[in-house]
Image (cartoon, rainbow, N blue to C red):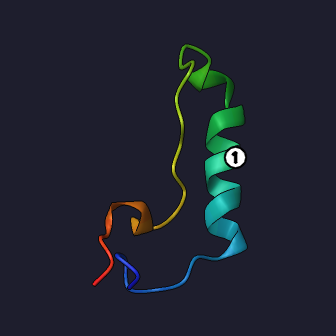
């Protein structure tokens, strides 16, 4: 049931956080960054 075929690691979440903290992304506001490996887009069987 994992869209990307593996369970996420702490490094996956850390990458998302680092991206949000990067000053180069300071024009992005009011968004939700889903760091779930695509699980939010899968419908249960």
Seen in the picture, residue 3 relative to 5 is either above or below; the reply is above
Quarter-wise, where is residue 9 in the image?
bottom right
- How many marks do you count on the picture? 1
Q: Which residue is rendered at x = 62% and y = 41% of the image? A: 19
Q: Which residue is rendered at x = 72% and y = 34% of the image? A: 21
Seen in the picture, residue 19 relative to 25 is either above or below; the reply is below
Asked whether, in this view, residue 21 is left or right of residue 5, the answer is right
Tell which of 45 and 9 is nearer to you. Answer: 45
Position of the C terminus by quadrant: bottom left
Counting from the top left corner in percent of width and height, residue 33 is at 53, 43
Asked whether, in this view, residue 10 is left or right of residue 3, the answer is right
Tell which of 30 and 23 is nearer to you. Answer: 30
Tell which of 10 and 33 is nearer to you. Answer: 33
Q: Residues within 10 Å of mark 1 (few under 14, many from 20)?
A: few
Quarter-wise, where is residue 39 in the image?
bottom left
Check disc 1 and report its element: helix, strand or loop.
helix
Quarter-wise, where is residue 10 in the image?
bottom right
Position of the N terminus by quadrant: bottom left
Counting from the top left corner in percent of width and height, residue 26 is at 62, 17
- The residue lying furthest to the top in this view is 27
Seen in the picture, residue 45 relative to 19 is either above or below; the reply is below
Seen in the picture, residue 6 relative to 28 is either above or below; the reply is below
Which residue in the protein does label 1 denote?
Answer: 17
Q: Which residue is rendered at x = 68% and y = 68% of the image? A: 11
């Amino acid at each position: 049931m994992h869209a990307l075929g593996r369970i996420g690691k702490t490094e996956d979440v850390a990458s998302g956080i680092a991206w949000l903290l990067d000053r180069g992304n300071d024009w992005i506001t009011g968004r939700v960054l889903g760091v779930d490996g695509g699980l939010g887009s899968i419908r249960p069987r």
